[in-house]
Image (cartoon, grey):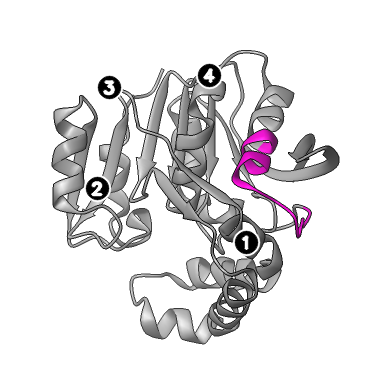
Amino acid sequence: MVVSTARIGFRARVIIVKLHAREWGHGERLAILLHGMMGSSGSWHRVGPVLAARGYRVIAFDLPGHGRSPRDAHLSIDGVVAAVIETAHHYSAKAPMLAVGHSYGGTVLAAARNQLQPETTVVVDAPTSARGGRDRDEAAARYAREARERSFDWLRATRPYYSEEDARIEAEAAKLFDPATAAAVSSAAGGSWPLPPGSVLIRPEPSLYVSDETAARLEASGVIVRGIAGAAHTVWYSHFDEFITALPGRSS
């Protein structure tokens, strides 16, 4: 486990936190992976080694309030972005060659992209806007309830495509997840962060998070849309080979 330091800014204060990260591979071709809500860096346990075999040094972050990264009951999306940017700079002064964000992590990546400047941006079944302004107490209660549900047995029963290792990792992530941090982000200001031409969107078909109309609009704007029929929201868990094929780039 690699630990790095990042500054999360909120209003007039700056908090120094340590973001935990998982690393595969080595070299100068940096790839960054951002997990979804209630996930962790461990969510990429099969994807990271494949990208490392393609010649990347792969860094998967535990986002604030997830995994073993610190909590912050006053966090905003801007604070998450600040953490991602400075943590990435800890590993390399150069922009990453590849950045992949799933669901909530995809929204964070869209918000961070202008500062992060990855050569290739990949968003996996994620909206590129956040409404914000949710009721903090209601959001915290909902997140806490959903996290309690995500036991190993529940995941195996509701997600038959999970291996035992997948379910174990995701159940552990749910135990470590902090509802107050997630609720802070949900209740803070939102925003919209359009993807530039050449970005890649990977989505299941059908998708509950990126509609066919949205996908068509993004494709018309120059975004490369790659659909995987019948895939789950966490595409690589249900359709691993198809997901890996949909990722841009090959081995070095």
Q: Are marks 4 and 1 in contact (CB under 8 Å)?
A: no
Residue wearing tag 1: 182
Image location (x, y in percent) of residue 181: 69, 61
Image location (x, y in percent) of residue 4: 78, 36
Q: Which residues are magenta?
A: 70-83
Residue in view at x 75 percent, y 44 percent: 19
Q: Are marks 3 and 1 in contact (CB under 8 Å)?
A: no
**Compared to 228, does 191 lie above or below?**
above
Name the residue type under label 3. Answer: Pro
Task: Give the foreground label among 3 and 4.
Answer: 3
Q: Is residue 79 magenta?
A: yes
Label disc, if present, on residue 242 of the rendered structure: 2
Q: Marks 4/2: CA distance? A: 23 Å
Residue 121 vs residue 184, the one in the foreground: 184
Residue wearing tag 4: 29
Residue wearing tag 3: 197
